[in-house]
Every structure is written in structure tokens, then in C-alpha cells.
Amino acid sequence: MYNNKVYISNTYNNNFHPNQKQWVDISTISKFDSSITYSKSDIVISTDSYYISLVDKNKGNNIENSLVWERTVNKPTADLFYWKLIEIWNPTKRYEQQAYVVHNNVLYRNGKRRVNQIEQQLHRPQNPYLEMLPGFEPGVDVDWARQYSLVPDTDYTYSIYSNPIILLNDRYYMATNKTEDSTLDNGIVIYINKKWENILVNINISDNTYTNVSSTAVFTDTRANAGAYSAGGITETQDQPSTITNYYLHRSTGSETDYSANPCYINGDNNIREYTEAEFDAIMKEMIRYVAVNLNSHKIRYYIGGSGTNMGSGMADTKLNGSTYAQREVGGDDYRTQEFPSGSATTINTYYLKARKE
């Protein structure tokens, strides 16, 4: 995965990085049109070659005019790329056997080896090439074989042999357990605050020490899904986000402490009685609540931002840091241009849950 797009190696001994800083995303390059005014360094495609404009206000010139256009390279064919882009699953498209798609941030492969029961019920003919017919959804239909995902999944069983690496809070984690029963509930411990031991923000997972206050995320970082935009889809829906990270509020009840001796009290019969542990627990809890809520200089308050002790991890708000323009000829004199999000992920702001005494 690179810049929120998934690539598959298209060569052996692959030590090349799909670094976008040295490359132009060819899906954003438009066909040459002599009626359009181009700026210096604009890139266009004509026939089977790419050309770069050498001057500003470049309009009406022949693409072969070497004074204003420089031919760079031939349009590359698929076998020349070191990396091949894996497309987002399209429910209206057929996929050949062994084809790869990405759906809900998970890489799948068409592992179909037979005509399934639904196709038989629909009286569809035998498919000699075992294509995946339209509408069979990865993650739902068993013929789509899950291959990999860097996105943490609390329902998935991880091991060193099965999806060992995940990306969590901008860090990579690798499973080291050789057993086949490792889930995120027992593999990662993060952000334990020993001073307060009561509330923290955790990310996506539970380490069995803290419990969710709610299954609803308190903050969700979304980012434009650059792969969902295409020139052929103009006019595209403006907002097509992908969920990057969900952040949840957690509570810790702390560990139970045994009293060295239970206090005593005089009951109504003037007898000395010992408090039970449950009775004295109730008294202590009321005292703690009173101090934390009412006592000056000891009131515990929680805020987003400001001064205080960080409770758990930061909640990152990210976006793509660039944009590109794509064009589409609808027909006749109808040309349409739309600005699409692109670039690398960048952090706009990071929010922290803070605890402080007032």
C-alpha cells in the first residue's frame, strides 16, 4: 500500500519503490488538444507518446513543433511497470481467475474453482474460465480469497504466517506469535496511564485492561479515496472518503485493593461492628467522587486540548496534500474538467484528551 493505493509487484527481485515524487500519475494526464492553452511543464499525451510544454501560453501549436513541445517517452505498456495498480472492486464488472481487487481496504484474489450455488440457482452456464461474475462481493462471497490488509481488524486471527503486519497509529506492528489464535485483543498493549488509571483514548483495539465507554467512535479520521476518482467518471461525487482510523473512549476501573483492616462503627445497639468490605467500598467511592467533583484544587476535569496530562494517544486529523485536474470529452463541444484530490497523506491537526485538576 502506498499513498492509499494498493500495488502488486510486476517483476522479480523488486527493489523499486513506487515513489510519487519522481513520477506523474499517468491517469491524470489528458489527451492533447490544440485549442487548450497550456502552461510551461504541462504534460499531455498524443498518439502513443508523452509531451511536455516548453513555454507558457502554449496554444494552437502542432504537437510535433520541437520549439514549444518536447517529446519525452512512449506511452508505457503494462509489462514495463515495476508496480501494477490494483483496482477498487467494481460490482458491475467481471473478474478473471486469479484477478486481484481491493474492497474495504482489504486485498482479495479471485480464487474461484467452481460454479457456485447462486449461479446454479440462476441457471447460469458453466464458466470455463471461472470468471467472477458481477455482484459477488469480496468479503461476502467465499470465492474471493482474502490476501492481506494493513488495516487492523479485531475479528481477524493473525499469525506470523497470516497477515503478520498491520499499520496502527502511523506505526507498523508485526505478529511474533507462532500460534494461530492471535487477535488484537491479546497482542498489543498501549498507553497505560499509571498516574490517573481511569480514562484514556485507545485506537481500534482492546488489550483487555480497558473497556469501551461506547462502541461509537468519539473521533473518526477520514481522507479522500483518490482511487475512487477517474476522468471517465466526471462529474464525480465531490466527497468520496475512506475511513482511516476510528478512535474510541475507554475507561479503566483499576485493580481492586484489599484493606489491611476494616474500620469499625457503633451500631444502634451501642455495639461495635466492623464494616464489611462492600460497605466501606461504598463510603470510599462517595468520598472520592466528592473530592473529584467539588473540592477546590482537586476537581478532575477532562478536555480536548489545552493543558493537562495526555490520556492515551493523539487523534490525528489527516488529508491528502495535493490535487490534480482531469478532463473528459462527453461529446460534441462538451468538455468537462474536475479537480480531484491527490498527493500524500499529511496531518492537519492532532487532538488529545487531557485530564487536569482545577
Image (cartoon, grey):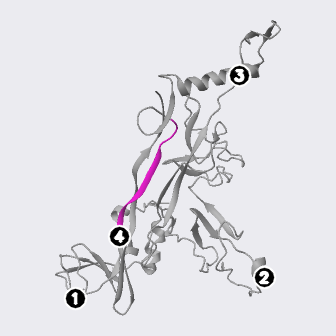
Q: Residue at x 58, y 30 (%)?
A: 197
Which residue is the site of mark 4? 324
Contact between marks 2 and 3 (CB within 8 A): the answer is no
* Mark 2–mark 3 distance (CA, rounded to whole Å): 65 Å
Could one spot residue 141 in this view of the protein?
yes
- Between discs 4 and 1, the one toward the N terminus: 1
The verdict on residue 288 being magenta is: no
Residue 1 placement, left or right of 50: right
Q: Residue at x 57, y 75 (%)?
A: 90
Q: Is residue 227 above or below residue 160?
A: below
In-front residue for pair 299/228: 299
Which residue is the site of mark 3? 281
Q: Amino acid at mark 4?
A: Thr
Camera-near label (1 vs 2) is 2
Camera-near label (4 vs 1) is 4
Residue 96 placement, left or right of 239: right
- Between discs 1 and 3, the one toward the N terminus: 1
Q: Is residue 56 above or below residue 246?
A: below
In-front residue for pair 53/343: 343
* Res 62 label: 1
* Mark 4–mark 1 distance (CA, rounded to whole Å): 25 Å
Residue 41: % across, % down: 24, 72
* Mark 4–mark 2 distance (CA, rounded to whole Å): 45 Å
Which residue is the site of mark 2? 120
Q: Residues within 10 Å of mark 4 (few under 14, many from 20)?
A: few
Q: Amino acid at mark 3?
A: Asp
Could one spot residue 23 in this view of the protein?
no
